[in-house]
Amino acid sequence: MKLMLPLLVLLAAPLFADVTGKWNGEVDVAGNHATPAFTFKQDGDKLTGTYKGMLGEAPVTGTVEGKKVTWTLKANFDGNAVTVIYTGTMESEKVIKGTVDFAGQADGTFTLKKE
């Protein structure tokens, strides 16, 4: 029985749950390629951080649920306020892949790799 308790604790722990750190991305939205950088801080299921890329710099907020990671940023694009939503899955401790919704006007795909 003593051997089973550590095994149960290990099985109950979510895999790849901590996204805290610096991530470099490859994004393709409607044929437009970008290479944003994100710095995330995770506290439980809450995600905060910063975005740096073609939209300038912006704060990021989101959630982490197991391997699913979702975050939003609000920025300015050609003088217009836009909301960009990323929804991804952690494929490993160092890779997140998913989709991006650019203000409801276009969507695409992304891959982030942890530094």
Image: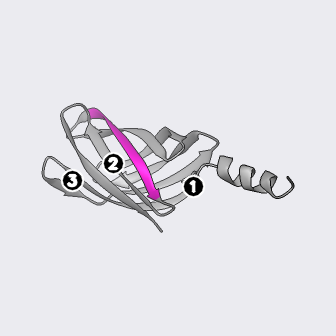
Where does residue 112 sit, x and y in percent of width and height?
38, 59
Q: How is the image coloured?
A: one colour
* Residue 89 sits inside the magenta stretch: yes
Label 3, secondary structure: give it.
strand
Q: Amino acid at mark 3?
A: Asp
Residue wearing tag 3:
28
Q: How many numbered discs sit on the rendered protein?
A: 3
Q: Are marks 1 and 2 in contact (CB under 8 Å)?
A: no
What residue do we see at 78% from left, 54% from top? 4
User: Residue furthest toward the bottom?
Assistant: 115
Where does residue 94 sit, x and y in percent of width and height?
47, 64
Residue wearing tag 2:
98
Can you say whether 45 is above or below 2 in the image? above
Measure the alpha-carbon separation of dots 2 and 3.
11 Å
User: Residue furthest toward the front?
Assistant: 1
What residue do we see at 39% from left, 46% from top? 88
Can you say whether 38 is above or below 83 in the image? below
Residue 96: name its quadrant: bottom left
Would you say 31 lies left or right of 12 here?
Answer: left
Which callout, 1 or 3, points at the residue further toward the start of the chain? 1
* Residue 13 sits inside the magenta stretch: no
Measure the alpha-carbon separation of dots 1 and 3.
24 Å
Residue wearing tag 1:
20
Where does residue 92 sit, x and y in percent of width and height?
47, 61
Label 2, secondary structure: give it.
strand
Magenta stretch, main secondary structure, is: strand
What residue do we see at 57% from left, 55% from top? 20
Q: Amino acid at mark 2?
A: Gly
Q: Are marks 1 and 3 in contact (CB under 8 Å)?
A: no
Measure the alpha-carbon separation of dots 1 and 2.
18 Å
Label 1, secondary structure: give it.
loop
